[in-house]
Image (cartoon, coloured by chain):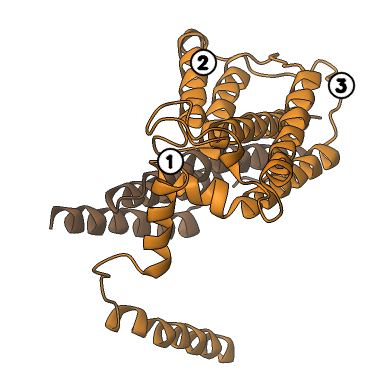
Amino acid sequence: MLNLVIIILLSIISLSAAIYAVRAKKLVNAVVASGVISLMASIVFLVLGAPDVAMTEASIGSGLTTVVFLYALKQIKSKGEKDDD
Amino acid sequence: MIKYLLTFLVLAGLIWLSVPLITEFTTSEGLNNISSEYVQLSAEKLNIPNTVTAIVVTFRGLDTLGEVTVLFLATAGVGFFLKRKDSEKQKKRPGSEILKTGSGILTPMIIVLGVYIFVHGHLTPGGGFQGGVVIASAFLLLILAYENFKFSHLLIHISESISGFTYVLIGLAGLAILGFNHFLDPRWLGLGEWGKLFSAGAVPIIYSLIGIKVGAEMSSLLDSMRDEGGHE
């Protein structure tokens, strides 16, 4: 029962983070929000009893992917035109 | 207007498709045939407590080999397209004092954690891929803290190539020693005692090699992304 409550709570957080990632004005915020989704997903995996998948999701999904996105964003900004978002 | 209608129709169709996922969902009471077979075989034949590792390294070893190859190709592609420019004194912001001090303490610990994760892949959750990414995150911390941090690319390339090559050699050793139909079979090395570090045949060696390979690839990927950015 407690597991169910935790899962529903995490799902609500990740859903709202997903909606925020789409609607956000600043791209950096959107990238961080998509990292939050992966983090919540990894906790869900942990609660459901899949620690291997949870570790992969936490390290790759919310760690490396976010960093690679941020680097790509920085590169676009330094190369492209002066864009405010 | 017609565009909105079409979007609505597609969304409604998707929802209609996923209704059975909710209405016909049942929680399984036990393991199905294949799963119970895997659980039994990994304990009896391979001496591996962590069934996930048994499946990833042994039963589906060929898939893992392919996965490592895909990762290698992806990293090689990134390194090829983002060519390293010799830095003509680009202006990089130095890391803050807190970040520098913290990275000095944390980096060795993170690397040790990563090594622990992939060496104990057959005993505890985690394995080569997870441990490798954890090691890469330690290098990321160094990159962020010290703006002129460089690591030896020769070392990375050598460790990556040797670990990949040795992985294939270990697979071929199973083929050579145990005979036909035993490619990537880790049982040519002794199975050892249940739950000990040196057990389960060649599985810890294979997972350590995968860990080194993934760590080297991810670090070089991060480094080439870093060098390309912030130019002009």
Tint of chain B: orange
> Does mark 3 fall on the same chain as mark 1?
yes
- What residue is drawn where x is 63% and y is 28%? B212
Give the Cα separation between the discs numbered 3 and 2. 27 Å
Front: mark 1 or 3: 1
Where is residue B156? Give x, y as percent: 74, 24
> In this figure, which residue is indicated by the disc labeled 2?
B107
> In this figure, which residue is indicated by the disc labeled 3?
B86
**A47, above or below B205, in the image:** below
Residue at the outermost left position:
A1
> Does mark 2 fall on the same chain as mark 3?
yes
> In this figure, which residue is indicated by the disc labeled 1?
B47
- What residue is drawn where x is 46% and y is 24%? B116
- SS for dot 1: loop
Q: Is residue B61 left or right of residue A45?
A: right
Q: Chain of mark 3?
A: B
> Within 10 angstroms of label 3, few (less than 14), some, or many (20 or more) residues?
few
**A33, above or below B155, in the image:** below
Q: Mark 3 or mark 1, which is nearer the start of the sequence?
A: 1
Q: Mark 2 or mark 3, which is nearer the start of the sequence?
A: 3
- SS for dot 3: loop
Where is residue B8? Give x, y as percent: 48, 86
> Within 10 angstroms of label 2, few (less than 14), some, or many (20 or more) residues?
some
Camera-side residue of B140 and A12: B140
Where is residue B7? Give x, y as percent: 53, 84
**Residue type at tag 3:** Asp
Q: Are marks 1 and 3 in contact (CB under 8 Å)?
A: no
Q: Mark 1 or mark 2, which is nearer the start of the sequence?
A: 1
Q: Are marks 2 and 1 in contact (CB under 8 Å)?
A: no
- What residue is drawn where x is 78% and y is 31%? B161
Tally the marks.
3
